[in-house]
Image: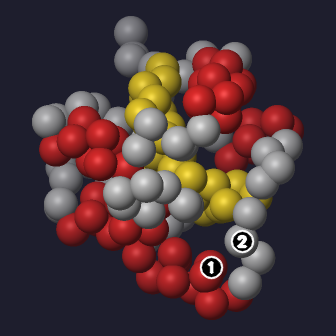
């Protein structure tokens, strides 16, 4: 039996963590969440098997874009897909995130049908 897809989600807003964790689990994914990017980076460095990271852009300590860049520089054995959660709308922001290695975006406020499609 295959293991479920493992999503690492992090956001500094506890309510957002709770909401998105519940939405992701509805689709039978395993979810680990962290309150900041440094904790998320620590999980990955410790060898946590992760298939997808969903990260808020604006985080204390390390931004979602910085986390994405750090993950891409690790040269991990398996590719980790990266979705950036943001309210930003500027083209330059999206370009910077894509250049850092972001695969996709979820715009705030989050739409459950769009989240499902991204997953």
Evaluate whether residue 87 shows in this view. yes
Q: Nearer the viewer, residue 80 or 22?
A: 22
Q: Quadrant of the N terminus?
A: top left
Look at the picture and state if 99 lies above or below 112. Answer: below
Look at the picture and state if 30 lies above or below 14. Answer: above
Q: Disc 2 on helix, strand or loop?
A: loop
What numbered label is drawn on residue 94? 1
Q: Which residue is mark 2?
A: 88
Q: Residue furthest bottom?
A: 92
What numbered label is drawn on residue 35? none
Look at the picture and state if 64 lies above or below 117. Answer: below
Using a 10 Å C-alpha cutoff, classify the residue at mark 2 as few (fewer than 14 neighbours), some (14 to 19) or many (20 or more): few
Q: Left or right: 57 with respect to 91?
A: left
Q: Position of residue 85 (x, y in %)?
A: 63, 55
Q: Position of residue 88 (x, y in %)?
A: 71, 71
Q: Residue at x 60, y 38 (%)?
A: 13
Q: Residue at x 79, y 45 (%)?
A: 110
């Amino acid at each position: 039996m295959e293991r479920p897809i493992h999503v690492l989600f992090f956001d500094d807003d506890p309510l957002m963590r709770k909401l998105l964790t519940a939405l992701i689990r509805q689709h039978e994914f395993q979810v680990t969440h962290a309150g900041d990017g440094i904790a998320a980076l620590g999980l990955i460095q410790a060898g946590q098997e992760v298939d997808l990271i969903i990260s808020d852009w604006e985080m204390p300590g390390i931004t979602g874009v910085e986390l994405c860049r750090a993950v891409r520089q690790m040269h991990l054995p398996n590719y980790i897909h990266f979705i950036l959660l943001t309210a930003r709308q500027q083209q330059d922001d999206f370009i910077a995130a894509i250049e850092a290695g972001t695969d996709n975006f979820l715009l705030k406020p989050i739409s459950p049908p769009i989240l499902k499609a991204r997953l």
